[in-house]
């Protein structure tokens, strides 16, 4: 029977030349570069809550790191190191190493792509639960915080919104997507890309940023609340995929667009003067960046439809503790 230490040694011990000391001691040691602050964030993925137990382990390995990279992107930080804490049921350890190998491959492929080093973690038996902590570097005082939005700022989003939620609605049989739509939307749900490079490039342009993990309304709401400002957005300015466009008159699609989680795109605010710079950035990064509204004085968020009428929604976004 494979031991805890075999698992760590076989799957999760890799060289970490960017750390002073990596996996294997009581703690890892890192030395941040001069003039930077460390950005630290943790995200936990729980079986049955964030994914189904039979999900492809390679994709799960990717996603467990991607959601953390997205938090670094939202701060404008460069991700450098990560720790990985795993609770594993017996069944996943005894698949003749298939499950663990695929999970580790998915995790490390994305880690290598972003030069992130795994420097520690914890491994225990239990219901499948994956907790990643990520550590990044950002120039002193420059991080993109939620409390930086100012009246007059434009509100922007990256990429397309709602595809992950559409895919989830399909998986949960609340909607039936065509095969081509499934092929387009499901990867957004299962293997999201984090806008890591974009986040770092927004420093100097944006006043505030957040990543969209719980839905646009909820996440933009956090910026408004922290910054003590109000916002107006125009629904028809939100960039969306061909699949989303097709379903958009339906309430379910509007909910996916405005309140669907799991897209891991960025929502940011920036002064009007930076519009040109942001448009250049969109072309350089090959990411659509759309200007969807404006920050104002006061509080609250108003969503307008194409006719200028206020859109109201039952759900505002994902909240684990709401019943
Ligand atoms: P301790 O008994 O001090 O908690 P452990 O035996 O849990 O140490 O872990 C031994 C080493 O392996 C530590 O350096 C720890 O950070 C690392 N480690 C444990 N689990 C993982 C994992 N899933 N991924 C990466 N490193 C891990
Ligand atoms: Mg331990």
Image: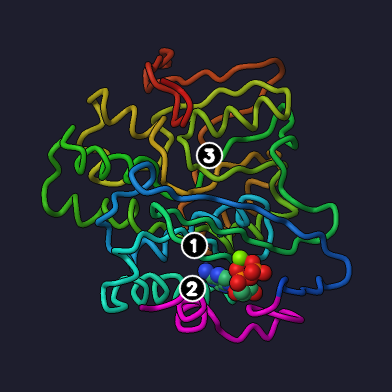
Q: Is there any visible trace of residue 118 in the rendered image?
A: no
**Label placed on residue 4:** 2
Label 1 Cα neighbours within 10 Å, binned few <14 / some 14-19 / many ≥20: few
Give residue 120's position: percent from left, percent from top: 62, 71
Please give the name of the residue rendered at 71% of the width and 18% of the height, measured from the top-left corner.
297
Quick one: SS at disc 3? strand
Ligand 1's image quarter is bottom right
The residue nearer to you, when weighing 296 against 13, is: 13
Q: In the rendered picture of this protein, how many numbered marks are placed on residues?
A: 3
Give residue 276's position: percent from left, percent from top: 63, 51
Give residue 240's position: percent from left, percent from top: 35, 43
Label 3 Cα neighbours within 10 Å, binned few <14 / some 14-19 / many ≥20: many
Quick one: SS at disc 1? strand
User: Label 3, on which residue?
Assistant: 291
- Residue 60 lies within the magenta run: no
Mark 1 beta carbon near ligand 2 (under 8 Å): yes
Q: Is residue 84 left or right of residue 297?
A: left
- Quarter of the image with the N terminus in it: bottom left
Assess whether mark 2 and mark 1 are in contact (beta carbons under 8 angstroms). yes
Give residue 239's position: percent from left, percent from top: 40, 42
The residue nearer to you, when weighing 323 against 228, is: 323
Quadrant location of residue 35? bottom right
Q: Main secondary structure of the magenta part?
A: loop
Mark 2 beta carbon near ligand 1 (under 8 Å): yes
Label 2 Cα neighbours within 10 Å, binned few <14 / some 14-19 / many ≥20: some
Q: Which of marks 3 and 1 is nearer the N terminus?
A: 1
Q: In this picture, which residue range is highlighted in magenta?
A: 1-25
- Cα separation, mark 2 vs mark 3, equals 49 Å
Please give the name of the residue rendered at 72% of the width and 43% of the height, measured from the top-left corner.
145
- Cα separation, mark 1 vs mark 2, equals 7 Å
């Amino acid at each position: 029977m494979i031991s805890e230490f075999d698992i760590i040694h076989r799957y999760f011990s890799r060289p970490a030349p960017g750390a002073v000391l990596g996996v294997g001691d009581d703690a890892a040691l890192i030395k941040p570069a001069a003039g930077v602050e460390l950005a630290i964030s943790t995200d936990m993925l729980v079986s049955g809550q964030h994914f189904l137990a039979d999900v492809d382990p390679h994709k799960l390995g990717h996603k467990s790191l991607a959601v953390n990279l997205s938090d670094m992107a939202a701060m404008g930080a460069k991700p450098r190191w990560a720790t990985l804490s795993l609770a594993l049921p017996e069944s996943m350890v005894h698949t003749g190493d298939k499950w663990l190998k695929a999970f580790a491959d998915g995790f490390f492929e994305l880690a290598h792509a972003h030069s992130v080093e795994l420097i520690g973690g914890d491994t225990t038996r239990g219901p499948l639960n994956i907790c990643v902590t990520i550590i990044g570097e950002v120039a002193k005082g420059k991080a993109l915080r939620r409390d930086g939005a100012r009246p007059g700022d434009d509100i922007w989003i990256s990429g397309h919104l709602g595809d992950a939620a559409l895919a989830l609605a399909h998986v949960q049989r609340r909607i039936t997507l065509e095969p081509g739509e499934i092929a387009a939307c499901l990867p957004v749900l299962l293997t999201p890309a984090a806008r890591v490079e974009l986040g770092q490039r927004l420093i100097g342009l944006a006043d505030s940023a957040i990543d969209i993990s719980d839905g646009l309304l909820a996440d933009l709401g956090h910026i408004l609340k922290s910054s003590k400002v109000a916002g107006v957005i125009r629904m028809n300015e939100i960039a969306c995929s061909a699949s989303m466009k097709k379903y958009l008159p339906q309430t379910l699609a509007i909910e996916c667009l405005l309140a669907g989680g799991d897209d891991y795109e960025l929502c940011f605010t920036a002064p009007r003067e930076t519009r040109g710079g942001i448009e250049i950035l969109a072309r350089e990064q090959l990411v659509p960046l759309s200007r969807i509204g404006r920050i104002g004085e006061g509080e609250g968020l108003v969503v307008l439809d194409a006719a200028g009428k206020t859109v109201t929604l039952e759900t505002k976004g994902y909240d684990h503790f709401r019943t």
